[in-house]
Image: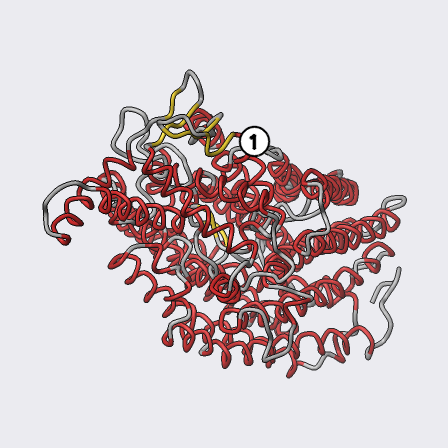
Amino acid sequence: MFGILLLLGQQIYQQAPPIPALVKSVSGEILYTRDDIETGQNVWQSIGGMEQGSIWGHGSYLAPDWSADWLHREALALLDINTLQSQSSLAPDQEMAMQKALLPALMRKNTYDVTTGAITVSDNRAIAIKQVEDHYLRLYQGSDEESLALRRDYAFSIHGLLDAQEAKQLAAFYFWTAWGATTNRPNDEITYTSNWPHEPLVNNKPTTGTLMWSIASIILLLAASGALVAYYVKQFDDWRDDILPEQGMATSDILSKATITPSMQATAKYFWVVCAMFVGQVLLGIVTAHYAVEGQGLYGLPFAEYLPYAVTRTWHTQLAVLWIATAWLATGLYVAPMLAGRDPKFQRFGVNFLFISLLIIVIGSFVGQWAAVHRFFENLTANFWFGHQGYEYVDLGRFWQIYLTIGLLLWVALVVRALWPVLQEKGDKSLIYLVLVSALAIGLLYGAGLMWGQHTNIAIMEYWRWWVVHLWVEGIFEVFATAIISLLFVRMGILRTSTATVMVLFATIIFLFGGVLGTFHHLYFSGTPTSVIAVGAMVSALEVVPLLVVGFEAYNRYKVERVEKWELAYHWPFMFFTAVLFWNFVGAGLFGFMINPPIALYYMQGLNTTANHGHAALFGVYGMLGLGLTLYCMRGLTDVTRWNQQWIKRSFWSLNIGLAMMTFLSLLPQGVIQTYISIDQGYSFARSAEFMHSPIMEALVWARVPGDIVFSVGVGYFAWFMFKAFTGSKSIKASTST
């Protein structure tokens, strides 16, 4: 699977939209150079990049998709120019109709010369480009009242003003991304972005392949779903009989007798940080959502002067990944010595050193991003290394990326050396090996984020970015979590080793078969060859199939918990794991597949349908898993007999109900309405300030408030529970058996 992923990646390198040496008119006027376009990309990164609007559908949902916006504006400008200059005797409406019919051929023709590296446009199109460029010059310089009003609607930072040269370079980059979305590939009738976005003016509409592969993927999904469910039901009784350990269910809590080593004790501060980042992420999410109606204020307060939208959204998305990843990493550091029964030499030092590094990375990258958006980085190379890279989920500067990669490899070393004594024991160690392999993959796969440079073609960058976001966050971490939870169940004496190993291997195989190549469903329209659509559509459909049986898994967890009374003490960690199964089906399965088929994503990409899937899947699956693992580890770090179970109960139900309200009452309706507009009138209008600030869309933004309040109550209960558990109970058990 990785071989196919790399093979298609090679095709992306070869067939990505070329960055021209220069863009010129027929009369010889030079409009842009390669340096303008590449520098413009760096300027765009420095002011927030994908956190302030999107490129090719990837990024934030408030400001426009800049590729679609430029394309629409240029098409309108060229249409007006050609109509005014026409010498025909037709009536005005007839003349306009004729020019509309001619427009697609004019704009879709590929005039890129491979020999000279030049794109040549007509003189009229050059005039249209200058007109659109002037719009962006005024917008990014805030030079008139109309532009200032639009900046408020887009929630632009008041500190994000550009000088004339920077604004022109940024316009050059926007032009190039729109050119790739408008221009047919050589010897083809399909644009570099497979006719995305939907734009009637230039005849951008779904390709035949987009529709056919969508139909094929749905048929495959139905066939595979029927086959898997039939097989699962047939084998269910046998699996249920084999799930319990050979020696029978444990009659007491074995893990409660484990020795709490100094390094295990040292992981407590990790969970404090997890809680702090979780609370911070939610608060920033509330502020970010509010900017959708007020733009540059928070209930009248000039909050955006200090934390503008580009900063709050950057920190909101980055914290989501960081606190979830920290919870999983801390679990690995806690569980490894617990299984071994002792610490290797200097293990506690390593855990503490890694913790300090984590704080430095978080604080350093956040300060750099804040400084970048506030225009403190005059040098764009310095911004690339220490400021804001502008790419969603991997916004941190290159220095911080390298630091984090080294930190992850250090984490792998700490986990491996702690588990080494377990590997020397007799018996089946296959599950341990699976934990180690997945841990190593976590350390290595983040390195994909180092595969692009400051001036890398954004189509190529997107390929590697989704290695990190999809394979690292959504994939390998899930395999690691499945392995570590199964290992804990085995050590607790409630799951047979052979069954646990098969379960983890099954999850891993499903991921490798569907998840690895499923990366391509993010890349349908990102300047990639059409083969990406074919492979991504068919394989992505299979990602949904195993989610159809999560009900059976939830039922098994429920039954296992009630075999012995002592297991009731693990009720709430188990409940969070069960919530993972539910949201895996709803958030990742239903909401994910809703936008996965190419024909669906063609109209939905970059709309609130994506945000709906992102919130339900990222927190519902990975966030709930992180909280469950946190509770699991806290059982050994605090006095569980003094836990306030009501606070956990209220937190659990508030988080789940609030998330459901957020998605079904606000994000999903917003996305559905935007999709209708995208199909009916074109993508650019669905993302325009005019539509996004229409009464119905702003009303749906306000409809998030009840769900956000309920969710925030759950966050508050969880944070208060953790505070009382760590400070209100007896001290942490260090180097003792209980």
x and y percentages locating residue 181 in the rendered image: 36, 40
Residue 169 falls in image quadrant: top right
x and y percentages locating residue 143 in the rendered image: 54, 58
Looking at the image, can residue 354 be seen? yes
Residue at the spot x=54%, y=66% of the render?
Answer: 560
Q: Which residue is mark 1?
A: 35
In the image, farthest residue toward the bottom: 646
Residue 568 falls in image quadrant: bottom right
> Which colouring convention does the figure follow?
secondary structure
**In the rendered picture of this protein, how many numbered marks are placed on residues?**
1
Under circle 1, the secondary element is helix
Above or below residue 520? Residue 47 is below
x and y percentages locating residue 429 in the rendered image: 65, 41
Looking at the image, can residue 247 be seen? no
Amino acid type indicated by mark 1: Asp
x and y percentages locating residue 593 in the rendered image: 36, 54
Above or below residue 722? Residue 268 is above
Task: Decide which of 484, 2 is in the foreground and name it.
Answer: 2
- 10 Å crowding of disc 1: few (<14), some (14-19), many (20+): some
Residue 338 falls in image quadrant: bottom right
Residue at the spot x=45%, y=76% of the render?
Answer: 661
731 on left or right of 696: right
In the image, farthest residue toward the top: 115
Task: Decide which of 58, 94 is in the foreground and name it.
Answer: 94
246 on left or right of 240: right
Task: Decide which of 23, 46 is in the foreground and name it.
Answer: 23
379 on left or right of 209: right
Residue at the spot x=42%, y=54% of the render?
Answer: 606
Q: Quadrant of the C terminus?
A: bottom right
Above or below residue 419? Residue 550 is below
Above or below residue 494? Residue 401 is above
